[in-house]
Amino acid sequence: MAITIDDIRAAAARVEPYIRRTPVMTCSSIDQAVGARFFFKCENFQKVGAFKARGAANAVFSLTDLEAERGVATHSSGNHAQALALAARDRGVAAHIVMPDNAPLVKVSAVKGYGGQVVFCEPTLSAREETLARVVEQTGAAFVHPYNDERVIAGQATAAMELIRETPDLDFIVAPVGGGGLLSGTALAAAHLAPAVKVIGAEPEGAPDAHRSFKSGKLEPSQNPRTIADGLLTSLGSITFPIIMERVHDILTVSEKNIVAAMKLTWERAKIVIEPSAAVPLGAAIQRPEFFKGKRVGIILSGGNVDLDKLPWI
């Protein structure tokens, strides 16, 4: 693969001044409830509340001065939008963020709060892509894809690098999978630093495109996904898919019931606030306890951006 361990190490050094080194936390009551030993990499405590800060920072600070002077651009209604706006602010360049006109106001406000220049479009993928193309043509900004970008993947890999260095002798690392930036980065870091560790992807049953793609060996796009884990609705990309096929041990799907159960268990027992997408890996362990029984399991809690007025157990 094009992304090497040197790329990941360079990304770690590059983003260190701009991100948080998040803690690895444990919870004995969750261990007892599920029957495994869990080590939670808390990216919910990351800047912008999600692991996305790592990839965005690496991409933005990888640009040459000439590339960066016209700013950066992307289309996103989620955590990547905020992460790219923050990274651009840290570098002192413009961030042009294409967002659907039905995006939650709290997310739009967050992007603007980080200095992002929001351009609205209709809430379709074609409208997002067409609007982004127009913005890039008008501004000359550098496009930073939310996940299908080697610089972004190398940045996301730094979370697993930190987890492995702090927590030796893991049997598994489980990460949620949407577009695959986090999972492919996790798998690359593990392959280089802890090759005995099996990397598992976790995905909602209501959005199982990565699972289908992994089993068929063909990239199968997401079709009408329905899940409370709204950060995992995206299909795998042309860069992330082959990395996942080569480096990931398996992709497990998780019911909505067990996503909610894992989220609630993490809030109640560990006192850690996570969003539904971040609960999917623990949900996989709840759903298949025999798979993880007695094992040392690293779990990447991908984010903690929650709408407190719409908690899924209410």
Image (tube, rainbow, N blue to C red):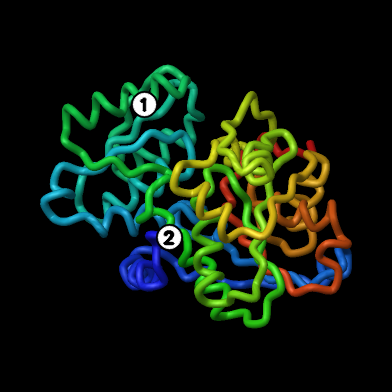
Q: Which quarter of the picture shows residue 227? A: top right
Residue 160: x and y in percent read 54, 67
Residue 41 location (% of width, % of height): 60, 66
At 39% from the left edge and 67% from the top edge, which residue is drawn? Answer: 4
Q: Is residue 43 above or below residue 109?
A: below
Q: Earlier in the sequence, mark 2 or mark 1?
A: 2
Calculate the distance from the C-alpha at mark 2 to the C-alpha at mark 1: 27 Å
Query: x, y percentage for residue 201?
Result: 65, 53
Residue 266 as seen in the image, left or right of residue 79: right
Is residue 94 in sight in this rendering?
yes
Q: Position of residue 306 (x, y in %)?
A: 61, 44
Which amino acid type corresponds to the residue marked 1 in the rendered image? Glu
User: Residue 183 sits in which quadrant?
Assistant: bottom right
Q: Identify the residue position indicated by label 1 in the image.
A: 129
Amino acid type, residue under disc 2 in the picture = Met
Among the 4 quarters of the image, the one containing residue 37: bottom right
Find residue 1 and name its label.
2
Closest to the observer: 142 or 86?
142
Residue 57 vertical position relative to residue 6 in the rendered view, above or below: above
Q: Is residue 128 left or right of residue 70?
A: right
Is 9 left, or right, of 138 in this rendering? Answer: right
Residue at 49% across, 35% down: 106
Total numbered badges shown on the rendered structure: 2
